[in-house]
Amino acid sequence: MIMEFLSQMMANAEERMAGEYQAWWMYIRGLAGALYQAYEGSRPVVWTSLYAFPMELLAAFDVISFDLEMASNFLPVSDPKISEATLVAAETKGYSRDICSVHRMGLGGHFQGILPRADLILTSSFYCNGKHKMTEILSQYLQKPVTLLDVPNEDSPEAVSYVVRQLHDIVKKLEELTGSSLDPGRLREVVRYSNRARSIWGEVLELQKNRPAPWNGFRLSNVSILGNIFAGTSFQAEFYEQLVTDLKKKISKRNLPGESHRILWLTWPEGQPTLIPGFFLENGMTVPVSETGSLYWDPLDEKEPFEGMARKLLQNPFVGPAEQRITNITKLLDDFQIGGAVHFTQWGCRHSNGSIRLIGDTLAERGLPLLVLEGDLSDPRNYFPEKTRMKLEGFLEVLEKR
Amino acid sequence: MSNHSSLPAIGWMCSYTPLELITAGGLQPIRISADGAAAPVADGYMDPNCCPYVKAMIGMGVQKNLRRLDGLVVVNSCDSMRRLYDIWKVHIPIPFLTFLEVPKRRDEEAVDYFTSQLEKLLQQMEEHFRITIDTESLSSSINELNRQRSDFLQVQEQMNNNSSSIKGSDLWKLAELILSGRKKDFDQLCKMYLKRPLPSSSQTSSSEPRLLISGNLIDQPTLFELIEKLEGKVVAQDTCTGLRHFSGLVEENGSNPLRAIAARYLHKPPCPRMSALDERAGILETTIDEMGIDGVIFSMVKFCDHHLYTVPFLQERLEKRGCPALIIENDYTWQNLGQIKTRIQAFIEMIRGKMQ
């Protein structure tokens, strides 16, 4: 059933690729295809956290990457009833509703038997504590060892060295799994793809500085998280190139929706369908950029790819003290001429929600309003449309009065 | 919270804080606690779904109830603790504040990295307090803390005997003495407990269900006193300030005391923050077997992800081995004690039924 659903999704995306949003449908086609491959399982399947792992390393091997957080949300989210059933499957096993719904979905997905096989399980210590724990629990249920990539909360030579040593250990595991040694030539190629994609993403962000912003920032946010599954592949660069072409076309046609307020979207892309994007569109609120979409890392050094990957992880705004996150936010406020920010607060996302006070202080110093918008990526029981609309209306009023 | 010595006081919150470094510098480590008091003022600083203990600490800091502290060492225990450090840095003045990264892995690479973190901490303290922490002072500090841990574990062993008069609440109070820096009182009480002759095995009785409390922190003796009233016997406390704090000694007289300290903290019985779930489950199973535990009560301060995520798995695993387990949550103030009482009462009765 899942593979059928993914096939339909791929076919639908292919049909729509001829339209105005070619790059977006290329991306959806790519995501559905990657998931399909994991279920097909024709090559070793590696479970990992694609948004918090140096995916370049996996791209250098013949493996299929699978992110159970993405999959568990991607599939059932189309129907709130399925989503709720998956959550309940975890809750009836004792997993509290106080833990992040994304992880309850992952656990529920296992209990419902909707996850593909895992040949190797990798996880990382950031962004949050919960992801590591969820993966560890699943590894116990599956009786497969889990390897943790422990990324410290400080960017220092010692931290780089600690991460690099772990990356070498992970290479050994991948070599054992695939039966082939890491090919330095292939790794060089992967690094080149990654750097090329990085550079084109920079072009995308430059185009988003246009007023009005040419692209829906909710989609940008989605790509900045889930799109990391393509890091180090030629597809990522091709898709970004198409995105640049699409955005340039949109700007030159001059038929973009009106833009009264430029909003910075903080934290995660909204998962389940909500009224939020529609409200933004109706009221001239654009999201030129999201917090997760920033270009925060330096290009990888071909000669020292492991050090480069380690630095990229340590430079992530969500690793380290809140200062690192706030520095990134401040830069986005300036670069994109932002008029206000929305912090989407996922219930149970303690690491991000714990910084709200400090982020609010930073915005207040600049005279910018911050809306703390409670929501839930996956749990339909924690999404209240009327409350959301009321909060957005209040925020809009504040923006209008400025 | 008060400092019972004349030495500069360094606050700490997590059992991964390397106390040896603090005492080697002639400083007094004091575990900070709000004794279970709520701190509504902290709601303005932290999200409602963050750890109530962390919020209580922020509340104490904001309300200037921690002015006696000369410094605070914050450890990367969890997401809420990371944010506590960030907020403290901006909103709560303190002469010395530092953040210590603790690996989640436990291999040699992790020990190397943690050693480098300890070197940094040592240097920071030397510079700030204008002190010298040398190998000799570190070794002496290691020996002293090892002695305290051994004494505590001996009392624990004695308590494990069924006819021992030492109760779970007594052991909690003993731990509290040393955690709050009252070393003399701790030593005296240990001596008193250890002087009592151990009853022979024939003297033991088995009328009270023997319970293991497993969880995060318990900053009041309320839970233990409640269980004692219900005629249960807490024989072990697998908590942040119980066995997980005291178990495991630092290797003495080694050539690299900092590395020895790093190894001890990473290799001690793991908190669920570590990447060691299977080992943690194994340790609980061994404790249950060796101490003749009849039931486990998982006790958690709310919103503690490390425990919230892992406890259902552990409960399932223990129950498969025939050891019943109960999960209770508290908001750090234990205001829900009435509700908890009913559940614990039913749990103890169920165990008693099994024992008959």
Image (cartoon, helix red, strand yellow):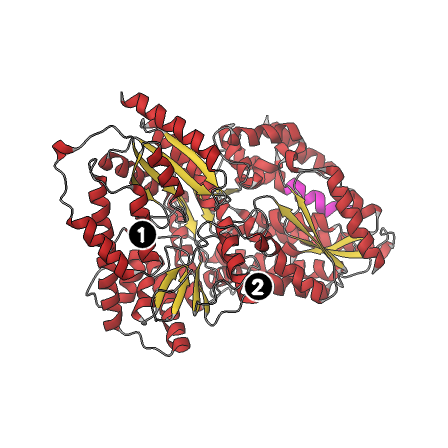
Q: Position of residue B264 (x, y in %)?
A: 29, 57
Does the residue at mark 1 contact the one at mark 2 (Cβ under 8 Å)? no
Instruction: Give the extent of the magenta segment.
Output: A21-30
Mark 2 belongs to which amino acid? Gln
Left or right of B297? Residue B86 is right
Q: State the quadrant of the C terminus of chain A.
A: bottom right
Reply yes or no: does residue A25 show up in magenta: yes
Q: Which residue is mark 1?
A: B175
| Closer to the camera in the image, B182 or A222 | B182
Label count reads: 2
* Residue A159 rendering spot, x and y as whole percentages: 43, 63
Residue A350 vs residue A309, the one in the foreground: A350
Residue B109: quadrant of the picture: bottom left
Q: Secondary structure at mark 2?
A: helix
Q: Is residue B132 magenta?
A: no
What is the x, y in percent for residue B6?
34, 71
Q: Is residue B317 above or below residue A161?
A: above
Image quadrant for the N terminus of chain A?
Answer: top right
Q: Which one is in front, B125 or A344?
A: B125
SS type, badge 1:
helix
User: In the image, what residue occupies the spot 26% across and 38% down?
Assistant: B286
